[in-house]
Image (cartoon, rainbow, N blue to C red):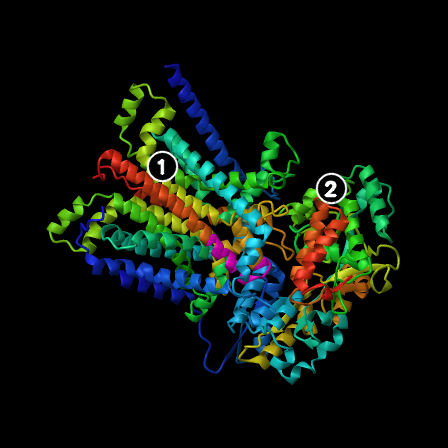
Amino acid sequence: MTTDAAGLGKARASAFVLPALALIAVFLIFPALWTIYLGLTDYRLTGLAAAQPRLVGVDNYTGALADTRFHTSLWLTVLFVGGSAIAGQAVLGFTIAWILRSRRGPVRRLVEGVVLLSWILPSSVVAFLWIALLDRSGGTLNALLGTPGFAWLLDYPMLSIIVFNTWRGTAFSMMLYSAALENVPPSHLETARLAGASVPQQLRDVVFPLLRRHILTNLLLISLWTFNDFTPFLLTAGGPEGRSEILPVYVYNVALRGGSLGAGAAISFLILLINLIMALAYLRLLRGRRRSQEAAAGGPPA
Amino acid sequence: MRRVFVAALAIALTACGSSTPAGPESVTLTIAANSIEGGKNSESAAWIKKWVIPEFERTHQNVKVLFQSSGVEDEQYKTKIALDLKSRTGADVIDLDGIWVGEFAQAGYIKPLADVGGPAVDTWEGWGQIPQAVQGLGIFDGKKYALPQGTDGRVLFYNKTLFKKAGLPEPWQPTSWQEIIDAGTKLKAAGVPIPIQINAGTAMGEATTMQGALPLLAGAGAEIYADRKWAGASQAMKDVLGFYQQIYGGSGLGDPKLQQEAKGRDTSFAQFAEGKIAILAESDYFWRSVIEPKAGVAPMADRDTAVGWAKIPAKQPGAGIRGQDFVSMSGGAVRALNPFSKNGKLAWELLAFMHSAEAIKSQLAGQVRISSRDDVNAEVLTADPMLKFVAEEVLPITAYRPPLAVYPQVSTTLQEATAAIVSGQAPDAAAAAYQSKLEGLVGGAANIAG
Amino acid sequence: MTRHVLGRLAATAFIAVVIGFFTLPMLWLAAAPFDDTPTITVSIPQFTLGNFQAILDNPYAAGSIVNSLLQAGGAAVLVVVLAALAAYALSRVHVPGRDLLLYLLLLMSSVVTGTAAMVPIFELATRLGLIDTHLGVILVVSGGLLPAAIFILKDFMDETPTSYEESARVFGATPLQILRHIVIPLVRPGLSTIGVWAMASVWGGFLFQFILLRDPEKLPGSVILYTLYTEGGAPKLDLISTFSLLYSLPVVAMYLLVSQRYGFRFHGGIKR
């Protein structure tokens, strides 16, 4: 796969990569390093600390790590990622892709259309849509369920944003899986079915082994995106009482609302480290699987 | 090929992005404000574009005035202005909320007006027209950093129709907190869903502090910052939290959930307009822009006959700050000069022009607001009984927030204390938690008045 | 046989639920813009087109959508072009530490695009003279989107067979020709997907657009949407709902156009 089929050569390959890398270096790596530096100061946007920021070393880090609000926020983020990205988007996306795999025509286009629409709409617009849906006094959901006055966003803030984010992001997983499912040779499934395998058995024995790489890539991407998703702020503002204050919202509240840019930068860097651990875990899974797969197939796939 | 494409894209985009350069002899001044035509504070933006700029350019031949309009959430506007000033750029005349003056001055983002605008500042005719208290909006550490644009006042709005239903008198003017509770109890008995709305909790942000915690604190005889000390978990603070508990602690007089909703304040406006809320503490903004029959966001067709207003009483008569029977809180926007302006003196001319009687009258054409100038108010406010009431009865007894950098954080802590009451904590516990957070913010117990 | 029928029934019911779940929140967008006095409640509107007149009277609304097109379109083009080049090279030539680098950049991009990097980005843009330019917005947002775009596209390129490229090379085609005439057509659905994804991401972005631009004539729709409030922060729902609808249409149209013309897929596996 990494054979140089087009005869690119190292020099030309570098020239191809360079423009992207230059842009990334200036507008991503440089600000990132600067942010790490800010995280070591007591920098604020206004007031005395804006005029003369002091180096405070790791105070911002120890402060955040000792803050129960940070712990709560981290736990809520884990729930959010587990509930909306993994259990929500990935499972729902796969199920839709699986059920639609043999269908063509208007039904498939309709389903894919509405799922994609919820992914494409701008987040500020989407926030209004969901407030209209979940509102306590005039929400559509309460009208449908006959539960007037039920405060979804206040009584079940985490559930609300988890369902919201499932709605918002399922499209990505659905598309990825439906493309991947087309690579599963129908004959394999047919053989399994003739041998009397139930659907869960077919999935376990035929589909998942073939799609492992796609599944893990998908999980990695959506976990990262969900971990850093700020949109729930537009629904609950982190409330009530911080009960839906996931980490990106926490950073926003500390850095912009509270004005402590130094502390906000430090927390962002902590988030980066947590994401790194998460990515390493996925990569380990991916490597382990690939190796066992290769061993089973008796060599690397052609 | 690729490079050419990117370069072409770059050129195309910068070309459509650049503004026409001013001629060599002409000077450009820029005004920045958090207002935008067709959006937030539309009238004010239209006034700058259609009146201030042409009029000023008419009398100043070689000056070109530009307007940088924003019209977003205050917090975001503040961020943008702070970033501009931090990198020593930005507009020459800048709109600020009065409460930001201290933190901007401490950061070196703004300088006293006279330092930028020169000696003409001190001899300006307008100073004589702006009451001392209102001037305070632009003063930090005894120096004048900005000109106040106008001010406001907080009162209790009430629905006369619901009051009649509950057999309550009209006009209504409570003289103690207990009378508010008594009225609420009667309204509740008469079937009013939400008798009292006093903003609480963190979701409402500064609206909780300004419409709830601070006027109540003033009514209990304490200021949030006085004699270089912040108000701690004093008896006055516990009284305030106790009053919140009377409303939200299970009596059914207020709706605790409404305080927690992300859009709770908007909902409270709509519910007042629908006749579901009977008593609501708000500033005159509520009257001008929310329930205004034609253009309000929650219009009430019968506003002029159905809505009454009363001063906010002290806990008991005479128990308020300075021994007052009634209290209020005020704020307001100001305009400052950019210390990094290349044309400071000219910028001051523009600023002073924007605050001349003639300019303010033109700004208020067609809408009534309380300006900073007495001469204009005397002429304009006769048109609206509510605003006249605020100018004459409320402004003399009002108080202002301390323009200090740490204030926004103190305010958040106050909001958290009221939020704790709403979610069922006892006043003593909430006050203790407030005290310990406050100590962390203001540098220890030494800076806190017990 | 019954198992099969039951399965079909369950699948149909599931599809109905999915359609319901995804459509339900969108009802407001279909009703409120046409309502005389829209509230947060979805109701059969007292039909009016007055809100559209009102939003067209807003001096910035229509122009802001053009600005969004410029900024989001520019960023999408830039991201697709740069990411395709980089992804192709990274897919075909082995660079040591390549995967690690990609993962690190991916991690960085998801964090740095948040609130904390606001000050560095702003200072950078100021020094580079990019304040108040469309180009500044495009470059800043593209920097944040590129790592994920390269990551996804590289996956695409990895899955395309190299045999065509080899034969083209035998016939003396240059690498750029091979990329343009052989690889690009093969991965076109992927490129269009990345384009739409980049565009949709920039389309809704607020913070950087807001702090980088000064002239209200250059503000994109995402910022203008947030100006449709009163001085006290109460939303003007008639304008907001109507503008939301108008402002959503271009991205939806873009998606429909692109997916019709080029296909829309998130993974390689081209059919042979």
Relative to A266, C163 lies left or right: left
Whether residue B198 is visible here, answered yes or no, is: no
Q: Quadrant of residue C270?
A: top left
Q: Quadrant of residue B125?
A: bottom right
Find out whether the residues at labels 2 and 1 contact each other: C-beta distance under 8 Å.
Answer: no
What's the residue type where badge 1 is placed?
Tyr
What's the residue type where badge 2 is placed?
Lys
* Image quarter (top left, top right, bottom left or bottom right) of the N terminus of chain B: bottom left
Q: Nearer the viewer, residue B163 or B213?
A: B213
Q: Residues within 10 Å of mark 2 (few under 14, many from 20)?
A: some
Q: Which residue shows up at 34% across the image and 30% down it?
A: A101
Chain identifier of the residue bearing label 1 in the image:
A
Relative to B20, A255 lies left or right: right
Numbered range of the magenta stretch: A256-272
Q: Position of residue C57 (x, y in %)?
A: 54, 55
Whether residue B425 is visible here, answered yes or no, is: yes
Residue C248's label in the rendered image is none
Q: Position of residue B399 (x, y in %)?
A: 77, 64
Count of numbered tags: 2
Q: Which residue shows up at 63% across the image and 41% down it?
A: A154
Whether B130 is drawn above or below A151: the answer is below
Q: Nearer the viewer, residue A237 or B420?
A: B420
Label 2: which secondary element: loop
Q: Main secondary structure of the magenta part?
A: helix
Q: Which residue is mark 1?
A: A177
